[in-house]
Image (cartoon, rainbow, N blue to C red):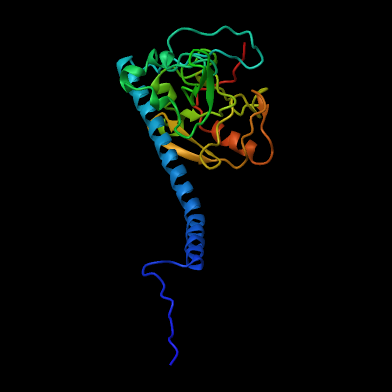
Amino acid sequence: MPETHQIRRPLGGFTLIELLVVIAIIAVLVGLLLPSLSQARQSSLGTACLNHLRQLQLASLTYVADHQDWLPPNSYSFVVGDTNTPIITDSSWAPGDVTRDTTTSNLLASVLFPYLKTTSVFRCPADRTTIFSSERGHAVPRTRSYNLNVWLNCDLAYGAAQTLAEASRPSASDVFSYIDTHEHGIVDATFGIEPNDGGPYSDRWVDLPAERHRRGANLAFVDGHAERWRWQGPKIFVEWGQPARPDGDLDDLRRLQRKLPLNTRANDWP
């Protein structure tokens, strides 16, 4: 009988088709998992940001306890409509200008630093903005992402609360303090916002909040807690003092205005 030969496949090997099937399955699984991983990462960054804001406010409360109920100074370097306003160099919770600061030296001079012992909490971990450092020859991360409500011990705002007692009306849990500020608009330490009293800036964002956290921002409150707010309208920075848009943006402004201390009065900008 004729001799027959059988071709044996090497043990443990894979055919090209089998490899392609495995690769396709892996690709599908990666496609399914990446959105979940991205959401988990964003959630983690948001949680870390909330923790930073809590730390800032708790440091502020400790400062208050050490200074006869006075709030940390909230100085400024820029006034809407007046680009020639000189930089204020007195003590502040956050000295300096984040569009110029390439090191944390100004934050080390913060009145809150002795209570924090770190400068990392001044920056939102989801904030990817950088500033070019001529000394280093490359871009470095910005040093700060947050501003403090202008109605909390800022001499720019006529009628601003100067003590914790004043800042706690109607209640300490109902007045916002520190807030995620839009990366294209943040400069100095203060977050400018006017009360809804019919004044020239009642319908305008003096400063614009950020939307880094899934179209939302994080805020700290005077009592020490922090919240994540989702905005109804997108936050697109055009200029300081820009009008709030009717696409939900104005509703967001009204919501934030309701979180001002009761003793605020209309502000006459210099």
Residue 49 visible here: yes
Residue 24, x across and y down, in percent: 51, 62
Q: Could you say which is closer to the camera, residue 135 or residue 129?
A: 135
Name the quarter where the C terminus is drawn: top right
Q: Could you say which is closer to the camera, residue 101 or residue 59?
A: 101
Q: Quadrant of residue 182?
A: top right
Name the quarter where the N terminus is drawn: bottom left
Residue 160, x across and y down, in percent: 50, 18
Residue 224, x across and y down, in percent: 37, 31
Residue 194 visible here: no
Q: Is residue 49 above or below residue 61?
A: below
Residue 222, x across and y down, in percent: 41, 28
Number of numbered discs overlaid on the protein picture: 0
Q: Is residue 227 left or right of residue 250?
A: left
Q: Who's the residue at 47% across and 52% down the image?
A: 36
Q: Could you say which is closer to the camera, residue 165 or residue 148?
A: 148
Q: Quadrant of residue 199?
A: top right
Q: Is residue 163 left or right of residue 180?
A: left
